[in-house]
Image (cartoon, helix red, strand yellow):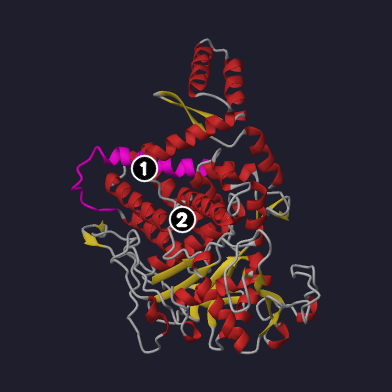
Amino acid sequence: MGTLLKCYKPLFSIRFSPFPNSLRSLQFSTRSFNHPKRRNPIRRCFTSLSTSSQPLINGKTVEPEIPSSDLWLHNTMSKKKELFKPKVEGQVGMYVCGVTAYDLSHIGHARVYVTFDVLYRYLKHLGYEVCYVRNFTDVDDKIIARANELGEDPINLSRRYCDEFNQDMVHLQCLPPSVEPRVSDHMPQIIDMIKQIVDNGYAYRVEGDVFFAVEKFPHYGQLSGRKVEDNRAGERVAVDSRKRNPADFALWKSAKEGEPFWESPWGPGRPGWHIECSAMSAAYLGYTFDIHGGGMDLVFPHHENEIAQSCAACKQSNVGYWIHNGFVTIDSEKMSKSLGNFFTIRQVIDLYHPLALRLFLMGTHYRSPINYSDVLLESASERLFYIYQTLHDCEDILSQHDKGLQEFILPEISNVINKFHNDFFASMSDDLHTPVVLAALSDPLKTINDLLHTRKGKKQAKRIESVAALEKTIRNILNVMGLMPTSYCEALQQLRVMALKRAKLTEGEILQKIEERTEARKKKEYEKSDAIRKDLAVLGIALMDSPNGTSWRPAIPLALQEQQVASS
């Protein structure tokens, strides 16, 4: 493997897979990212929200009103929202810090990668070609400690948990990044960057270790707002009396007994945590790129140290936008492995549909803290069931009509669609306000249910055409948001199965209860029938009566509903 070029121009030519619903296959070399004269005309395409033929009102084609696609993102560096302007027109380079792979990932991790998956999808939807780099840390103190506990090779242990993480991302419908580099595969690049930092006078060697001298970098603290004197040893900075300043951090650690190591100019050892991301982002995106992201806990020290390292290696180093998501909390305390107050993604999706977890995470603005609770997950699960049931009902009725149906719709339906489009673009372009988008689903979903199930709606002119246009609009938005299931029917069944698991019931037991209730009602034993309904409601099973009989659906358990009402 070759070493980095001067100032870390990108080395690797990356081929991009097409994003669902995009107009074209997106393929380009990362070498173009830092070429100031290379300008490709940006193509902002909204085809993932539109159709091949636009709806018609009174026989005339209606073009949906498309608002400005300007994207505003909150930049941690400036502490304010800024208009997003990529360094190379039409192309975006984005690096997101990945997991340290030594255990199953928790829902705090899920929040990070759902957040940046939403950004990745939306950038693509706006027509950008995106090179999304998300690394794996597979060389680290925590990995070594865990491997020693288990008597396992650290690299093999980490590889196993990288695979587990990727499975979690598939469940959450997070698109795979363009590149997923691992530390163990990039030692030449890491060593070369450390050499440049040392040669430039920003680091010093102590025995077999190399430390970054923070006092040599006058802008240290610009991202976090911290001063060097605030960084006391022992508080997220390793204690080591050999360091010139307690805030200095390790670029290279000398080998210790029983640890993996690599040869270097300073002797055998391994890299410090922070240097890996500087080296790998430079290798794939160049020394200047658009977006660097991660959880809020990475602002200091990790991202602060990255900035110092990268600028020390190459003074032109620059990231346009630093983006950080808020914490997942439990009882107002940050969820983390170190505190032991976490739920793994696997634990949650064992009881809840993975897309219910995604919906829950998107239900709060990405920069705000989100408090994990059963009632919020139950609420997300119930909402997801409602969305998919409505769209499944659409599929049922549309399957009964000619597929060559003309797309005539009434002005009031067109207004609903256009308002939803406008709300979508306005909210997403305002620093990814996903909660507003999810709330905006209510009107088109209600309109569909009115058309399908109310007496007035069933008599509406152009009813089927309107249902088709509304379903297509919602489906396309769900695709962009990463909430579109493979099949509505399959997702509904999965949601039912998980509701039964949480209720500790079988479907046969519920059907038996429904039968008992039906008999009680026939005998006018209304107290008994009400008791059966309430007993099931307590367990999160709602009964629905209709002329065709009684059916059931998942619901928020009664006790949690009361808790929700009390808290609000």
Amino acid of disc 1: Ser
Q: Position of residue 176 (x, y in %)?
A: 43, 59
Nearer to me, 45 or 551: 45
Disc 2 crowd rating (10 Å Cα; few below 14, some 14-19, many 20+) is: many
How many numbered discs, if any? 2
Q: Nearer the viewer, residue 376 or 304?
A: 304
Q: CA distance from mark 2 to mark 1?
A: 17 Å
Question: Majority secondary structure of the magenta segment?
Answer: helix
Q: Which residues are magenta?
A: 382-409
Residue 541, image x, y percentages: 55, 30
Q: Quadrant of residue 351?
A: top right
Residue identified by numbered label 2: 174
Which quarter of the figure is the N terminus placed in? bottom left
Residue, far top: 523
Task: Indicate the position of residue 549 as horizontal and vertical percent values.
Answer: 42, 22
SS for dot 2? loop
Q: Percent x, y for residue 264?
A: 58, 75
What residue sits 60% from the left and 74% below the top? 275
Please name whichever residue, 444 or 117, is drawn nearer the observer in this view of the structure: 117
Q: Is residue 283 visible?
A: yes
Q: Is residue 450 above or below residue 131?
A: above
Element carrying mark 1 = loop
- Residue placed at 24% from the left, 62% from the top? 61
Q: Which residue shows up at 70% across the image and 83% down it?
A: 213
Identify the disc placed on residue 487: 1
Q: Is residue 170 left or right of residue 292?
A: left
Which one is closest to the eye, mark 2 or mark 1? Answer: 2
The numbered disc on residue 478 is none
Of the image marks 2 and 1, the number of the one nearer the N terminus: 2
